[in-house]
Amino acid sequence: MKIMKFGGTSVGKPERMHQVKDLITRDNDPKIVVLSALSGTTNTLVSIGEACAQGEKGRAKEVIDQLEKHYHAFVAELLKPGPALDKAKHIVSEHFEFLNIILKISFNEALNKDILAQGELLSTKLFSCYLEQEGVLHKLLPALEFMSIDSYDEPQVAAIKIRLSMLLEENKHIPLFVTQGYICRNARGEIDNLKRGGSDYTASLVAAAIQASVCEIWTDIDGMHNNDPRIVDKTVPIDVLSFDEAAELAYFGAKILHPASIWPAQHYNVPVKLLNTMQPDARGTIIQETTTASGPRAVAAKDGIIAIKIKSSRMLLAYGFLRKIFEVFEKYRTPIDMVTTSEVAVSLTIDSKEHLSDIIKELEPFGTVEVDENQTIISVVGNELAEESGTLTRLFDALTGVPVRMVSFGGSPHNVSLVVPAEHKKKTLQLLNKGLFGL
């Protein structure tokens, strides 16, 4: 059995859903199809939740009405007149009745998670209506019946495996299943989610749970590129990446793949394919255990970075100093991306401002704290890159005139990372594309 995940742009228009149906019925292989919400829906649901949280029920009502109008137009174009269209209209009305009901009750975070879940619930139910109309044998498999996270927001892979296997066994005569990405239940049994990009995560977790033959991630570009095609004119798709390379690229900014989606597939050795819905015959990128290629493979950029320097000639070499520094970030559950040290200072980066003022306050007793916001991490990724002679020379020769704030090399054999001011991001990516890839 294989997994096929389609993102918001792949199902964002009726004709795109038609294409998805053609793609999933090209062969008779048993499969589970994972769908995101229609493009733009999650952002709209976020704005509805924000308006409710601020007590602006009128603004929330306006957004709900606009979104409902969009969905009624969508189903009218997706489906022919008949039972499937009538069913789809009822589904849309039912979900928007719920969204209107929330305007009349007290708002809380649990309710907000319910709001955010509506996008995936709608997309899968409407796609199921379309498959029914086209006579495609399938079953809607509610993610809320098997996808769960624990009290630390980590997926419960063993429990997912048990519940999902039972559902598949109960429906073993069905060759095709459709389920929601992103949504899940938390440790309290409430509706929750796997955070942004979570549909990729769902697909990978499902693939791991059932030991799928492959996990296909269908998007609107033809695989992972060697650089950001939105910023750099000349980029090329990469045929094969190792799990380690792909994980580094995803974590450090490659938008095509959610960072968390690699580890389940890697742990259970399920190949991942990145494919293009609009060019289904393009080779795309396959991510697997090993790759024979060496040297720089791709460059990724992660925005919204905050660089923090703690300078203390008195404390730095003292026993336990670094531990005390890291305990501050652990206390506020704030991950650290990069770390560099010198004789008198420690520099590190984080990607969230949520607890920044509290963190700075607790770091100040250790020394002078300097904070640089609006930074970008630029990562050069490749197989065993640290062992490739000449890589650093080529990299820094390419970056003449770029102010580099930090450098991390050797922490991973597959990654060299730099921190530069955000305003130099575009120039840095373009220079590296020319200096490392000759493009």
Image (cartoon, rainbow, N blue to C red):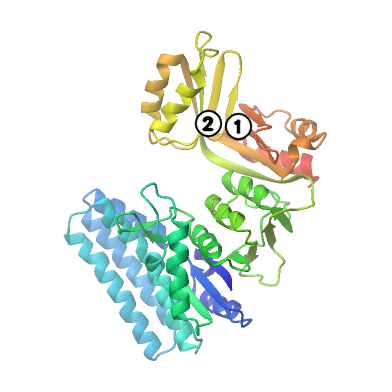
Furthest residue to the bottom?
82
Question: In terms of image quadrants, where is residue 381?
Answer: top right
For the point 73% across and 40% down, the residue is 432
Q: Quadrant of the N terminus?
A: bottom right
- Identified by mark 2, the residue type is Thr
For label 1, count other residues whose C-alpha is less than 10 Å away and answer few (under 14), some (14-19) or many (20+). Answer: many
Mark drawn on residue 349: 2
* Residue 241 place in picture, x, y as percent: 70, 54
- Image location of residue 92, percent across then percent down: 33, 75
Cβ atoms at labels 2 and 1 below 8 Å apart = yes
Amino acid type, residue under disc 1 in the picture: Val
Residue 335, how many percent across, how many down? 48, 36
The disc at residue 419 is: 1
Residue at 39% across, 31% down: 331
Mark 2 burial class by Cα count in 10 Å: few <14, some 14-19, many 20+: many
- In percent of width and height, residue 103 lies at 21, 60
